[in-house]
Image (cartoon, rainbow, N blue to C red):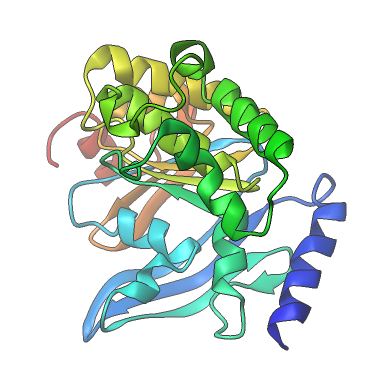
Amino acid sequence: MNQVYVKQNVEESHQNMKKASPVLEVKDLNIYYGEHHAVKHITMPIEEKSITALIGPSGCGKSTFLRTINRMNDLIHGARSEGEILYGGINLLTPKVDVVQLRKEIGMVFQRPNPFPKSIYENLVLSLKFSGIRDKKKLKDIAEDCLRKAALWDEVKDRLDKSALSLSGGQQQRLCIARALALKPKVLLLDEPSSALDPISSSKIEELLLKLKEEYTIIIVTHNMQQAARIADKTAFFYQGELIEYGNTDQMFTHPAEKRTEDYISGRFG
């Protein structure tokens, strides 16, 4: 299997994506840092056009799991993964997968906003230019569309040439979401995207994600139980590298099946 073959298969799989469920299927996933077994035997499906929240105490494997989905963990020395993460019938963990293409299909937004030290507009179109898009009208149209989807257009449309670093923290995070959308991903990964933001900015991020799930599949790591309860369709509770419970959010928060889940949600530990 070469890179072109993988790209073609990923693209072809999207023709059947509307009928296919789940979008991602994790099977017996194990993640190691050297000898440390960080994530243990995770099996779970991720449904299309839904929000899946990953909850659990610090160090339980949530972010490690999230970063492995689009191979960001490859950048960490000593990290390795075993098992399967199936996307369009392709195991994303195989070394023959085109990782650059994968990260276009499965975008990621990090805990702290990380806009490029360039203009708002350049933040949105830089990756598109690297992808070979040169048509100025097309670039402008994509930039506007992504800013509208990120509920940021009305706030920045008159200062697109200003530095992205001049935006507030909440605006910067929405810009980072817009930047990820510019590459037309199918899945969006978010690692505690509102933990560094004030309550008003956090609320705007939540409202944005609820709108975006109409078009995208979203997986979010959060320490905020109320946030998970408000926005997630499905919730997965991780503890010490294991998936303790996974199911409908309403069910988990009202009638958890596992005692450890109940203890964590009720604040007895974590």
- Residue 141's quadrant in the figure? top right
Which residue is found at the position 24% from the left and 32% from the top? 195
189 or 135, which lies in front? 135
118 or 222, which lies in front? 118
Reply above or below: 188 against 231: below
The image position of residue 87, as x and y in percent, is 66, 63
Reply above or below: 53 against 97: above
The image position of residue 142, as x and y in percent, is 66, 35
The image position of residue 82, as x and y in percent, is 45, 81
Q: Is residue 146 left or right of residue 54?
A: right
Reply above or below: 220 against 39: above
Which residue is found at the position 23% from the left and 85% from the top? 34
249 or 114, which lies in front? 114
The image position of residue 203, as x and y in percent, is 36, 15
Reply above or below: 10 against 246: below
Which residue is found at the position 12% from the left and 35% from the top? 268
Q: Is residue 10 left or right of residue 71?
A: right
Q: How many marks?
A: 0
247 or 160, which lies in front? 160
